[in-house]
Image (cartoon, rainbow, N blue to C red):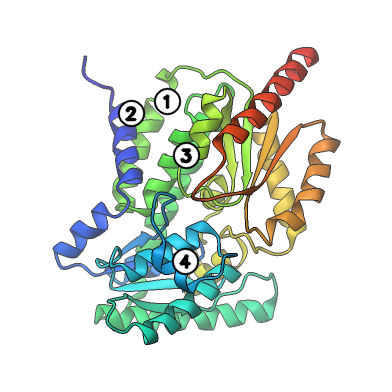
Amino acid sequence: MPSRPGETALATLHRHYSDREGEARRRRETGQKVVGYLSNNVPEELILAAGMFPVRLTGDPRDKTEIADIYLDEVFDGGIKSIFNRLFTGHFDFVDLVVVPRTSEAFLQLYYFVTEVRRWEPERRVPDLYLFDFLQTPFYLTNQWDRSRLALLRSRLEHLAGDPITEGALREAIATVNKDRRLLQTAAALWQGAPSRLSGVDALAIIGSGWFMDRAEHATLLESIIEGGAALQPRSGPRVMIKGSPQDNADFYRLVEKSGAAIVAGDHVFGDPTFAALVDEDGDPIDALTGYYQLHSPSIRSYPQARQDERFMALVGSAAVEGVVFYHDEYDDTLGWDYPDQKRLLDARGIPSLFLKRQSYRRPDHVAQRRALREFLEALTAQTVAAR
């Protein structure tokens, strides 16, 4: 029996999510310039408007990090070490420029270390790096600073492209990415809704594949998935949110869902917050991009925290979350400060939570994770049954 269009579209998105650099490499082979970027805090709309292909660069827990282990301190998290190693081993040889945002201390230190080590090992071919010195405090002076940084990034991209970025191209790029975000907002009902019809692993692939492929094609595939959503079978299990450190791969999601949970929301920089807001299409496009990336692009250092917690609890409510799994990296120095207040917010609503702290990126203790998840889900199921 032939597969339904929605199933074919979902399989295509999973393929792009797994083969993250395949499309970028193909574009490079055709002569198109490729700009890699780290995190949600780099305006891919500017890259698109310059006629270049944007691709989000990530690490991989299966990578060896022999070069990173020489130069980087132990407290660098595994994802940063993997990216560092990939930069120095030629893994990102298809990239013409890497844009590194300053929206986390880890990225800033990555930029400094790469810049310095390039001087020590000049024989290694490392892509050019550009520091996007962008801040995310909700103040007027921050906005003015960020606008000037956006203008500098625009100039750097224009120099690389060899042509100016026109206002028309910029407006078109904003509309293209906004359309994709709107469709993600609609598609999210398939995992956030009651009943949930797509797994958390599917959600990660649906969201994440957009960073590794053509945005317009991604939108078309989303339309097919949405159209066929009603035919998908409802999923059972306690409705769980994953919150905390970046989930740049689906390994932990698979473990959680194999333990019996239904992941209906992901509150981290690779999850649901990435498409929650849109760029204003009516005003000046540079002002609109500045406002969006200053105030709405998710990062682990967004300020003020009270606003982020309000958004977090709104997602807990809209996705009818029954339990939250906090997952923190072993070298986390940011999210742990926010956890006590977030737990208190959940406790006030009677929503149980599990705190998995100091989790290794490369060698997580799956046995301990399964045991903790089993106990948490058993208690969560018992509480849900008792409340009915």
For the question of whether residue 296 can be seen, the reply is yes
Residue annotated with mark 2: 6
As drawn, the label of residue 69 is 4
Instruction: Name the kind of residue labelled 4 in the image.
Output: Asp
Report, in whole angstroms, how far the alpha carbon at label 3 lies from the one at label 2. 24 Å
Residue annotated with mark 1: 229
How busy is the neighbourhood of tag 1: few (under 14 within 10 Å), some, or many (20 plus)?
Answer: some
x and y percentages locating residue 150 in the rendered image = 48, 78
Q: Nearer the viewer, mark 3 or mark 2?
A: 3
Q: Earlier in the sequence, mark 3 or mark 2?
A: 2
Q: Quadrant of residue 308?
A: bottom right
Q: Nearer the viewer, residue 295 or 355?
A: 355
Q: Is residue 147 above or below residue 40?
A: below
Quarter of the C terminus within the rendering: top right
Instruction: Name the kind of residue labelled 1 in the image.
Output: Gly
Which residue is at a point 79% across and 16% down the rendered structure image?
387
Q: Is residue 138 above or below residue 16?
A: below
Q: Nearer the viewer, residue 222 or 284?
A: 222
Q: Earlier in the sequence, mark 2 or mark 4?
A: 2
x and y percentages locating residue 281 in the rendered image = 47, 62
As drawn, the label of residue 251 is 3
Q: Secondary structure at mark 4?
A: helix
Which residue is at a point 72% across and 23% down the rendered structure image?
380
Report, in whole angstroms, how far the alpha carbon at label 4 lies from the one at label 3. 23 Å
Q: Earlier in the sequence, mark 1 or mark 4?
A: 4
Report, in whole angstroms, how far the alpha carbon at label 1 lies from the one at label 2. 7 Å
* Whether label 1 touches label 2, CB < 8 Å: yes
Report, in whole angstroms, how far the alpha carbon at label 1 lies from the one at label 3. 25 Å
